[in-house]
Every structure is written in structure tokens, then in C-alpha cells.
Image (spheres, rainbow, N blue to C red):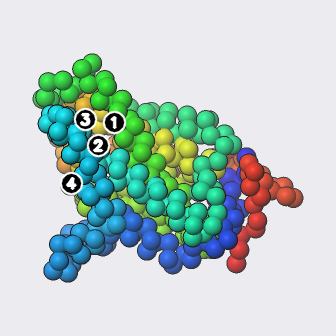
Amino acid sequence: MGDTSLTQGNVLVRLVGHARWPTHWLLAPLIASIILGGVAQFTAPFGVARPSLGSPFLDSLMDGLVPFLTPTMMAPVTGALRSVSVSLYEQYLIPLYLIGAFAMVAVFVALWVRLVEWRPVHTIGFVASDALLSALLGLLLAILFTTIIMIGLFATWLLTLREAAPGTVGPDAIGAVAFMAFVYIVQGSAEEILYRGWLMNVVAHRLGVAAGVVVNVLLFACAHSRNSGFGILPGVNLVLFGLFLSLLTLRTGSLWAACLWHAFWNWSIAHVWGATISGESPDGGSLMAWDTVGPALWTGGAWGPEGGLPATIILALGTLWLFLWGGWNPTARRSAPEYGDIVLPAPRR
């Protein structure tokens, strides 16, 4: 295991030095925005609509390359599903779009890393060392955090049963719930690949870990600011969410924990508890069906439980723990440092 300290000696930051042509730190945020966030991510936090170019084609492209391409790329799949069953089409349209869109994000990053930076794709964080342990840590922490939040809301009478369509809740929905776990693994992993695996470390390689964390966290929060129910506290929680995942990635020296934590945080809230997630209603099915009631400060309002004060407290405590924790191996130093089969050069200046 390599260095998991919060310095440029961190193994993930040093892996960027394996590139023949590392992406310039000024270019990296622009590329991340073009791929996923678009122009609207910089106007939405202030309640301002993105500017229009007077063309539906160009306006759609301004929302990001992936959102622009997804309807065309997924049309054959969704069309085939509709021809088979209209009810299945209505139930799985959004999940299928999520799979297609976020798989495309991962592919774009992988192509950039391999063909432009000219380094192995797994150097963004998918290395073999302690992969299973890191993945298990991420999964268990996600379930623990969301369970504490939701039980806290339940115990204070801030949850109420939600009426759901037949077959979409409980034992009848087990298959759909399992499928949605796969959907969120794709979605959560793609976001971690873009923001924590690539963007953070490319910036940190030249400017230091603090800069890498700040840039990726702010872009991550802005990209989600267009969701329904966004406000000050959801914005704060998005920053804490990104900060927690940044530290989790650096402290474990890979993306495995962050990918599983991100995926199962979303899945647990939406498809175990059946609550709203980031302003979106749960699609596909859930084990339970709950709505939040009461002050938005505590419940998150239209954003859902992850936008309330209980989530703020849990994420803040988790972030503090990661900051204080040294990681799997905080001071790993060798005369010829290696990580798996990759020789790690010193960061380029």
C-alpha cells in the first residue's frame, strides 16, 4: 500500500506523474464541466437560468456533452423496451438513462486518460491493493450513515408512510431494488472517476492536495445544484459530501471505497427507505416507502433527507474522522516506491 497522507506524496496524486502528458490543472476543470456539468452548473446556484444561444441544439449542448448525447445513445434501448412493455418502459426509463449517461462519463474519462495523458486507466484509482477491504469499508459506512439519519428522522416523527403503486414496494420489488443497486454503482462510480479519481488528483499533482480537493468539491456541488429542492443547506451538505469522499479516496489510496460509499448512500436512501434523493423521487422500486414531514431544516425538504441537518452532522463527523485518521498507510516510503506493478515517479514540476 502506498502513502495515504494528505500531501503530494499521496499515492493517487503521484500516480498522475505516470502520465506522459499530464493534463494541465487549468484545463482539467474545464474538461470536467464540458463532460457533465455544462454552463448551467455555474448559474443554477445563484438561481439564474443559463444563457440561451437561440438554438435548441446549442442550448442542449451547453448543458454538458453527456446530457446532450444520452437521449440519442439510449433511444434504441428505450425504444425496444417500450415495444415489449409500456409499464416496464415507464418504470425503467430513468434508470436506463442513468446507466447510459454515467457509463458514458466513465468512458470519456478513460479515453482521455489513456489516449491523451497516455497512462494506464487504473492509475485513476482502480488498483488491486486492498481493493476488497476498501470496497467493504465504503459500503458499510454508507449503510451506517444513512441508517443513523433515517432512524433519527423516524424516532423524531419526521417520517410518514408514502402511498406507492402496487408492486413497487416490499417483497414484490426485490428484483427492482437489486437492479437499482447496479444502477447506482454505475452512477456513483462514474462521478467518483470524474471528480475524485481524475480531476482532484490532476489538480493536486501540480498545486497540492488542498487545491485538488477544493476544485473537485466545488465543481461536484455546482453540478448537482440544478436538482429540484436545491438550497443553502443542501448546498452545504453537497460540499461536505464531496469533501468526505475526497478524504475517503485519499485515505484509502484508491477509488473503491468512494465508489461503493457513493452508490450505497444513494441506494439506501432511495431504495431501502424509499425517500427522495437529491430532489428526485426514487425510481424502480424500494423496500419501504417514506416521505419526510416537518421543518425542512431537519428533513431536507424537497431535496430529501440528505439535505437536512442530521445529514450535515453525520457528514461533518465522518469528514473529521477521515481528516484525523492516517489511512491504511499514512507514511509509506520506499527508495523505489511501487504500487502494484506501477513505478511511481516523483511529481513533475
Q: Can residue 262 be seen in the rendering of this structure?
A: yes
- Foreground label between 3 and 4: 3
Position of 168 with respect to 27 (left or right) is left
Whether tag 4 and tag 2 are in contact, CB under 8 A, the answer is: no
Residue on which disc 3 sits: 284
Residue on which disc 4 sits: 229
Viewer-side residue, 185 vs 234: 185
Residue on which disc 1 sits: 180
Identify the residue at image location x=39%, y=66%.
Answer: 35
Q: Position of residue 129 (x, y in %)?
A: 69, 43
**What label does residue 95 carry, if any?**
2
Callout 2: few (<14), some (14-19), or many (20+) C-alpha neighbours within 10 Å? some
Position of 191 with respect to 269 (left or right) is right
Position of 90 with respect to 118 (left or right) is left
Dot 2 lies on which element? Answer: helix
Viewer-side residue, 118 vs 17: 118
Q: Position of residue 113 (x, y in %)?
A: 57, 64
Mark earlier in primary sequence (4, 2): 2
Q: CA distance from mark 4 to mark 1?
A: 22 Å
Q: CA distance from mark 4 to mark 2?
A: 20 Å
Dot 3 lies on which element? Answer: loop
**Most distant residue in the bottom direction:** 53
Whether tag 3 and tag 4 are in contact, CB under 8 A, the answer is: no
Q: Position of residue 346 (x, y in %)?
A: 76, 68
